[in-house]
Amino acid sequence: MDFSTYSEPQPVHKAPPNSRRILFIDSYDSFTYNLTTLLESITGAEVHVIHNDTLLFPELLPHIDSFDAVVVGPGPGSPEIPEDVGVIRHLWNELPENKILPILGVCLGHQSLCLSAGGKLKRLNVVKHGMITKLEHVGHDIFHKVGEVNAVRYHSLHVVDPYLDEVEPLAWADDGEENGKVLMAVRHRRKPFWGVQYHPESICTRGGGPEVLDNFWQLALDWSRSNGRKTKPLLSNWRIRPRMKTLLEGVAELGRKEEEVRNPVVVGKEVEYLVMENTNLDVPAIADLLGARTAEEFAVLDSASAPGRFSIIASFIPETTPKFHKVGSRAEAEKIPLEPYGSVWGFLAKTMNDNQITTGPTEIPFWGGLIGYFSYEVGVDALEVPLKHRSPTHSTPDISLVFVHRSIILDKQTSRLYILSIHPTDTAWLHTTYASLLATSSLPLTPAISTTTTPTPKPIIFPPARQTYESAITTCKTHLSAGSSYELCLTSLTPLPPPQDPYSTFLSLLHSNPAPYALYLRLAPTTILSSSPERFLSISRPPHQLTELRPIKGTLSKSPALTLPLATKRLQNDPKEVSENLMILDLIRHDLHQFSGAELTVPQLMKVEEYASVYQMVSVIRAPIPQAPLDEPARAITQADLLSKMLPPGSMTGAPKKRSVEILQDVEGHERGVYSGVMGYWDIGGGGDWAVVIRSAVGYDEGKEGTRWEIGAGGAITALSLEREEWEEMVVKLRSAGRVFGEVRS
């Protein structure tokens, strides 16, 4: 299937902002902001989002008159379960006659509408999650002037017995022997209520997306005009804000005195730097010079393959380099209290914003700033999901960051070396380091990897028990069939033999599995050796900040017979692989639409890329971050805002994210730790780059017990997953990084 012509959905007629309002009721879905952004573009209206349990029906009722229409969004679960739909179930039959207004139900909302009209729910024989289906439709009503529709479906339940007195069918999918004819759209015969089972906001819906939403809006306005309905101003007790409050606004609202919000770092007013042209030095040589093999704490971010270009080697200042740790609810950053900031996110936003430097060598991505990681459980906590498997004695930092004043950047494209410092009056270090690097560059380079042919016995690494892992896959598929999730990213952790020399093991990993987001990070009590291929989030410096995400879903192990064109054909024509990537792509679009509005683009959709040991299907999403008004600097969106709303990575959870995370905690039965989190840097100039912690080994210091090493691997489970194939994919991923520790037996 050729995805090169697909792009972000655009409105048929983009309306200018106006005084109209839409109430959007969200059932904790992970596609919500894709739909609200499209609605805003089509209607020009202000969209107010509430969850289905934000207000009880009697509390919502007085506010209904303030809205021109309601859109009931998709979500996990079943409309037959009150907790899954909350206030939604009261809308269809309990609105007083003088409160009735146009309502559109999408997916779960569609099912709820049909259920209220006497319809019955049934499980599909073959679940449709991330599947693209051609629809039949009536050609009028919300399908007025709509041609061929190829719709993306995310559902395991469907409405049967559609020919009811109360609703009129408008569209169907013919699933043949799988499910027969499936109802895809309806309208209520007496009330201005409509429903669509498919997802009009998905990037792969063609023909029935913006076109149908535009028709709904025009029908809604026509109904209101013909029935004399006029909206009223918002009531004074309506507390829902159409615009998200930034972390800096939150800190400002706390109203703490300046001395309470103290600055924990000291930086100069500008970036001092020297440049060495045409260097023959590589990353191992530079890191060796700075003491990587013996240092108690060290950081290397190495772009060992495309699309990476720059490598960063951090140089810590003994006794003075600030380090920030957060363990559960306890934060340690020279014992800085978090109360003046509201949260650790507020602390990071305020600290980095207050110390931002605006001038420096713009051609390189890092001048200094934060380097470190955020664990998977940081994201779970941000979703307000209780951590079920947290030990009372847990001491590993969930957030571990070091503030880097001194760094060396290697531009592998130009062979140019930058020696930088943002520490006040650090000229002497710059010149001393330059001289040392120059002297080292004149010496013959020694191989980073030993070329000895003497065979040494390798430790045996055993993956998780196959039966246990395949049983977990079956459990995931049961949840998918019930409609609790569309996709579940199941993972496992495998113990590793402790390496004698972690840094040398990292170099071996770079040699055997080069990756664009490789990292060596030693920040006690944690060590990360990573060859990650997946960018989570990059962001350029102000004033014109652009974000990019590169989710990976769809994997084939390389072999001599499998070429890139053949791998591309196999992956792009495999419904399971396409649905995996599509679901995560739609989820990440939702995450980013919270900040970027309608300016998001998808320049690369499901392109197959070649890596050292695998072929992977990669999509690319980009979006600008709006600038804060000059008179309201606290409205600036920082990386802490982005990370706090987008973690954990959607490619490591599934969709909808919150429900999937809850399910995975039960299925996996343990915390993931650093694995499945993100690692990278936040540049003092405002840019940053974060990668997903995959293809990575993590060491945890455990005092007298020594260091515990483990590696994570897994895969996205969909309704089409086969236990055997998912097991094999997990082992392929495990082996790609685990083989430098020993022989991975399957």
Image: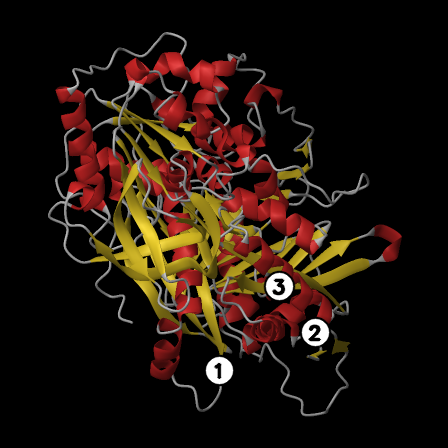
* For residue 184, above or below residue 609: above
Marks 2 and 3 sit apart, C-alpha to C-alpha, by: 27 Å
Q: In this view, does 185 lie to the left or right of 113?
A: left
Give the amino acid at mark 3.
Answer: Ile
Mark 2 vs mark 3, foreground winner is: 3
* For residue 273, above or below residue 270: below
- Which percent across, then down, holds residue 637? 39, 33
Secondary structure beneath disc 1? loop
> In this figure, which residue is indicated by the disc labeled 3?
473
Secondary structure beneath disc 2? loop
Label 1 packing within 10 angstroms: few (<14), some (14-19), many (20+): some
> In this figure, which residue is indicated by the disc labeled 2?
741
Residue 584, by quadrant, is bottom left
- Which percent across, then down, holds residue 295? 69, 57
Q: Do the residues labelled 3 and 1 touch (CB within 8 Å)?
A: no
Residue 551 in sight from this viewpoint: no
> In this figure, which residue is indicated by the disc labeled 1?
558
Q: Along the line of sight, which residue is nearer the eye, 588 or 329?
A: 588
Q: Along the line of sight, which residue is nearer the eye, 354 or 3?
A: 3
Mark 3 vs mark 1, foreground winner is: 3
Residue sitting at the far top: 236
